[in-house]
Each structure stands twice: as structure tokens, then as C-alpha cells.
Amino acid sequence: QVQLVESGGDLVQPGGSLRLSCAASGFTFSSYVMRWYRQAPGKEREFVATIASVGRNTNYADSVKGRFTISRVNAKNTVYLQMNSLKPEDTAVYYCNARREMYNYWGQGTQVTVSS
């Protein structure tokens, strides 16, 4: 059974940091490109960051470039999103995504709220 379980979401003040984790199971994690997306209230889900299945190739949305870092540890079947210098506009539910060819898996999401 395929599972993606996100964790680490919380309420944080502007300028603060959080690290999100996504634990994968039920598929060959190291063969999949991993991505983070987010969805704010009343808005469409949007791309945040991606990391290649192997190596260190990454890409980011312009809105988070320089503040967020995506990483993965294939031995732990886990992908991370380090979020620094958080802004109120980063408030959203953050989703983990695994994709390879016709296979496309989603987690249930974790809430990040940036507010004073």
C-alpha cells in the first residue's frame, strides 16, 4: 500500500523556520522524483519545490527561492522541506508528491500557518 505521510507543520511567527518531512512507503522511493506543493485557502494548489530521484538536482518556485531547501534521504525513504524566513503568504497546506512515468502519489498534507 502506497503511503506518503507529511509531518512538521505548525504555527510559526513571521521570520521563523520549519522543517517538513514526508515519509514514503509502498513503492521504490529512490526511483521517484519528489515534489512539494502547497494550497492556500481559496487558491489552487501550486508547485513549491522538486528534487530528482538521485543526485542533487533541485528546482524551486520563484516565491520560495533562496528561503526553502528540498532534500531527500533515500535510505530513509524521506523527503524534507526546510523553510526559513517564513512569511504570512507561506500559510498553506503543504503536500508531498511522488511521480514516475504514469504513477503519481499524494500525501494528505500538513498545515503551515505563519502569523504573529
Image: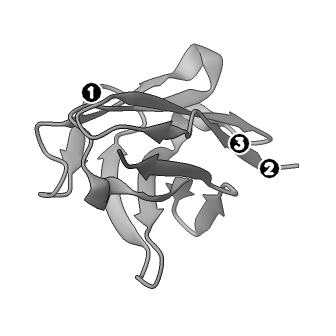
Q: Which image quadrant: the C terminus? A: top left
Q: Position of residue 92 (x, y in %)?
A: 45, 61
Alpha carbons under labels 2 and 1: distance apart: 24 Å
Front tag of 2 and 3? 3
Q: Where is residue 68 in the image (x, y as percent from the top left)?
A: 25, 37
Q: In this view, does 97 lie to the left or right of 63?
A: right
- Is label 1 in a helix, a strand or a loop? loop
Mark 3 crowd level (few <14, some 14–19, many ≥20, 10 Å Cα): some
Which residue position holds label 1? 56
- Is label 3 in a helix, a strand or a loop? strand
Front tag of 3 and 1? 3
Q: Residue at x 11, y 57 (%)?
A: 62
Which residue position holds label 2? 2
Q: Are marks 2 and 1 in contact (CB under 8 Å)?
A: no
Residue 65 or 105: which is nearer the viewer? 65
Identify the amino acid type marked 1.
Arg
Q: Are marks 3 and 1 in contact (CB under 8 Å)?
A: no
Q: Residue at x 43, y 62 (%)?
A: 38
Look at the picture and state if 44 lies above or below 66: below
Q: Residue at x 62, y 63 (%)?
A: 103
Which residue position holds label 3? 5
Identify the amino acid type marked 2.
Val
Q: Residue at x 67, y 54 (%)?
A: 107
Identify the amino acid type marked 3.
Val
